[in-house]
Amino acid sequence: MDAVVSPDPATKPLRAALVGNPNCGKTSLFNQLTGSRQKVANYAGVTVERKEGALTTPGGRKIRLLDLPGAYSLSATSPDEDVTRDVCTGRHAVEPRPDLIICVVSATNLALHLRFLLELCQIGRPIMVVLNMMDEAERIGLTIDVPGLASALGLPVVPAISLRRSGVTHLLEALDRPDPPPPAPIPEGADLHAEVAALIGRYTNALSLRGDRLADRLDRWFLHPVWGPVILLVVLFFMFQTVFAWAQPVMDALEAGITALGEILLSPLPQGLLRSLLADGVIAGAGTVIVFLPQILILFLWILALEESGYLPRAAFLLDRIMALAGLSGRSFIPLLSSFACAIPGIMAARTIQNPRDRLVTILIAPLMTCSARLPVYTLLIAAFVPHRTVGGIFGLQGLVLFALYFVAIVSGIVAARLMTRGVTSDEHPLLLELPPYRRPNLRSLALGLWQRAVMFLSRVGTIIVSLNVLLWALSSFPAPPAGATGSAIDYSLAGMIGHWMLPVFAPVGFNWQICVSLIPGLAAREVAVSALATVYALGATEDSAATQLTPLLSAHWSMATAFALLAWYVYAPQCISTLAVMRRETRSLKVVIGAAAYLFGLAYAAAFLTYHATLALTG
Ligand SMILES: Nc1nc2c(ncn2[C@@H]2O[C@H](COP(=O)(O)OP(=O)(O)OP(=O)(O)O)[C@@H](O)[C@H]2O)c(=O)[nH]1
Ligand SMILES: [Mg+2]
């Protein structure tokens, strides 16, 4: 439906859509204009679905703004770019055609981005051009004759720096002016490349500029066939060392604080159910998981900094050969890398992959990439069973084991992908991978990103983790033991019974019944396994043990073989219902989900079995 009659501005908001090439700053602009906090990062393909927001201009105009996935052209075929094309051309199932297209163009990459703009001109909608990244243009000495370019294009062109609030004032002013008419279509068969080259030659000094010398120098090292992989390995290695080394003092302080708080809260309470619920359910549940916040934040600090720096796509480029070994292309790298934070955004990011087979295999191996929810399980067991010792004088043994766990998971992912693709390399062209400019991570956005992560983690603790733990507490406390019973109360409870029922299945891999119990709530969120163990052990203990002291308890009760078997289990097990749900949504196939769960459980069981028996044989 075409808006022939101009809508009443007081009631009907203008529908505007942000469209442009990947990584030109659409989402940054969207966040700046609407006050949202959508994910921004320095590589192509961050946004994979449309997001909506609202704003009111200084002149009082109401706008409904749409952030769309970046696209290279309107004829692209990957699922994320389909959304952009369908919305722009009015073929989207639910989203009506926008009243105004705000085409975002990076000033530093005009050759590519203007071409897409010319293509957009063909669809006959009103267009406003935002010339973004003007700060970077200035830094490299690029000057643009903005009025000249605007008149040549026949479109309004507004310079912007979407990192700053002050950088979008011109755009807000422009949005208060009457909408531009749709551009005149470019004649059929016109050479868009030549047109763009002419525009650049005429209205900018780009041709006389030398490229970014610093980027060239950095690339010479980072993309070097030998030094490149060495640097990547060192970066990852250092990352895992810091997870233990930097976090420990803060974790100790947190643990002491939680124990003290627990004592203050519990001391006025008499022995009994309420006290047990608070101590063994709530405090044990929340406390044991909150302690891991510093480690999770350190890991995210690294991920966020790497994302902003522009290094990640280079790593993808380096690993292209390894990806080829697995039968995949470098395109799968970013989705897999996102899975280290959480498999859910990782699986969604696979929408950027055009080839359906590659996309499916990437989705299937994404859960093998170690998500941050496994970190509490890993570090708890490592702290309890791996001595705090240095190796070769500099490397912490604990960090080394953590690195090894991540490494084993990656290798397993590659092997699994190779089996699934039967080693046949995909036809997805690796060179399509775009190398973004290097950028110093902005401290404010790093801090904001960490803050968001902390809030997300704590709200998970406050909601799902505590409620599951309270549920587990109830299952572990009832039914009460019969009069005259001798063992600890939990042995007679429902949870105790379930644990004992499961035991025959898991005894061969070295798990005790307490672990079996903790595996169940761990299905909802992996971290819960840790708090669940705390609850089970706290209730099983005869004295009033502090729940945050799980580490010494485990090293006293478990053999090293059991601990290592559980670590191996967690490397593989599809212990997360939400991941399976997203897999189902993205692949629209229950068969794929069942297949994925089966192969991951099979792997987990086999790995735990082998690890258990190998460790037993080695440790006697
Ligand atoms: N220097 C500078 N950097 C910017 C500006 N706008 C965005 N960025 C950075 O550019 C990168 C990409 O920004 P995004 O907003 O994620 O880009 P996008 O267009 O949404 O990318 P896709 O969702 O992948 O299509 C991030 O590193 C931003 O911090 C700007 O005006 N100046
Ligand atoms: Mg985006």
Image (cartoon, rainbow, N blue to C red):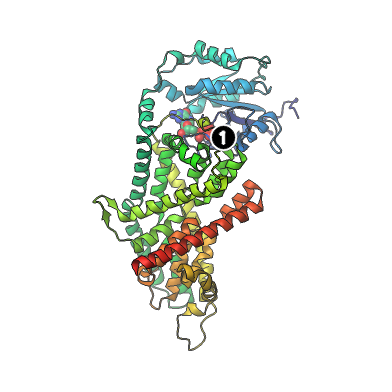
Query: Of all residues shown, which one is farthest toward the left?
Result: 393
Q: Nearer the viewer, residue 282 or 306?
A: 306
Q: Residue at x 68, y 16 (%)?
A: 188
**Rendered location of residue 122, percent (x, y):** 67, 21
**Rendered location of residue 378, percent (x, y):** 41, 58
Q: From this view, report whether residue 282 is shown above or below residue 123.
A: below
Q: From this view, report whether residue 313 is shown above or below residue 564.
A: above
Query: Of all residues shown, which one is farthest toward the bottom?
Result: 484
**Rendered location of residue 571, percent (x, y):** 46, 56
Where is the C terminus found, in terms of image quarters?
A: bottom left
* Mark 1 neighbour density, 10 Å: few (under 14) some (14–19) many (20 or more): some
**Rendered location of residue 298, percent (x, y):** 38, 48
Q: Residue at x 62, y 32 (%)?
A: 63
Residue 37 in sight here: no
Which quadrant holds residue 100? top right
Three-letter amino acid code at the position of disc 1: Glu
Q: Name the element at disc 1.
A: loop
From the image, tell me which residue sits under label 1. Answer: 428
Where is the N terminus found, in terms of image quarters?
A: top right
Mark 1 lies within 8 Å of ligand 1 (Cβ measured): no
Q: Residue at x 32, y 59 (%)?
A: 252
Q: Nearer the viewer, residue 77 or 440?
A: 77
